[in-house]
Amino acid sequence: ANTAWAFACMDWKDRDVFVALADACSRRMSAMGENHLSQLYLVLLHVRLEWPDLSFALSPHDRKLQFAYQRKNLAPSQFQRDVAAALDRVGWTHVFEHMTPEGLSLDMAKLAEKHAVEVDGPTHFAKVPATKTYVENGSTRFKSRLLRRLGWHIVRVPYFEWNRLLNAAEKDAYLRSRGLSAAAPRMAWQTGPPPGLSS
């Protein structure tokens, strides 16, 4: 399961690899824990988006895999609640903790427009010591790619940028600078993975 997930994270284009790995995983699924099952759900989503007509061994297990994936979602953090409160202040109305039909969670979302804000804590990043920058880790990039393929437009709020803001006025100004307000003429939506972010 972990190998299939790693290939999906890398956006591997050889579908025969996924077919072989899925066949092997489907025979061993009864012995798998929740973490491996949740990984396989993301592999299933990846394959469906890449090759919609492919007969895939994981497809009959869709509901079981999705259930395992959704059980792994953590309760909202104080960081997430703080950003949501600031979005309310600047007039960016949203649904808090939205689950897409495919089972992917979004921290804050405008459903009609398919616009969302994701808050990213330390587990979403790897630090590059030589340049003192942060880069999104593989699992975060993988989820972002799936959401983009499903038509979502994402603004990400990294914890190390948010933690520098000293008060509500600075937080509100930060969100407005990212195009997040009722009056913003254009949204600063992320259309691809961001470059390294300064620490």
Image: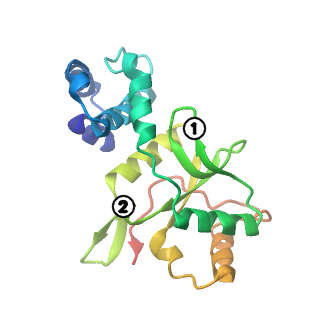
Which color scheme is applied? rainbow
Residue under the image location 46 percent in, 48 percent down: 144
Q: Is residue 175 visible?
A: yes
Q: What residue type is disc 2 on? A: Thr
Q: What residue type is disc 1 on? A: Thr
Residue 23 location (% of width, % of height) = 23, 19
Task: Identify residue for label 1.
Answer: 100
Residue under the image location 46 percent in, 38 percent down: 70
Q: Is residue 65 above or below residue 125?
A: above
Q: Secondary structure at mark 2?
A: helix
Q: Secondary structure at mark 1?
A: loop
Q: Which of the marked residues, 2 or 1, is nearer the chain's N terminus?
A: 1
Q: Is residue 179 visible?
A: no
Residue 148 location (% of width, % of height) = 52, 43
Residue 22 location (% of width, % of height) = 26, 23
- Of residue 186 and residue 142, the one placed in the foreground of this image is 142
- Return the residue found at the far right: 183
Q: Is residue 18 above or below residue 195?
A: above
Residue 189 horizontal side relative to residue 68, left or right: right
- Give the crowd class for mark 2: few <14, some 14-19, many >=20 residues within 10 Å: few
Quarter of the rendering containing residue 43: top left
Numbered badge on residue 120: none
Q: Is residue 16 above or below residue 182?
A: above
Numbered badge on residue 123: 2
How far apart, in angstroms, are the residues tagged by discs 2 and 1? 22 Å
Q: Is residue 115 above or below residue 25?
A: below
Residue 91 location (% of width, % of height) = 77, 64
Pick the quarter of the image with the N terminus: top left
Pick the quarter of the image with the C terminus: bottom left
- Of residue 96 and residue 116, the one placed in the foreground of this image is 96
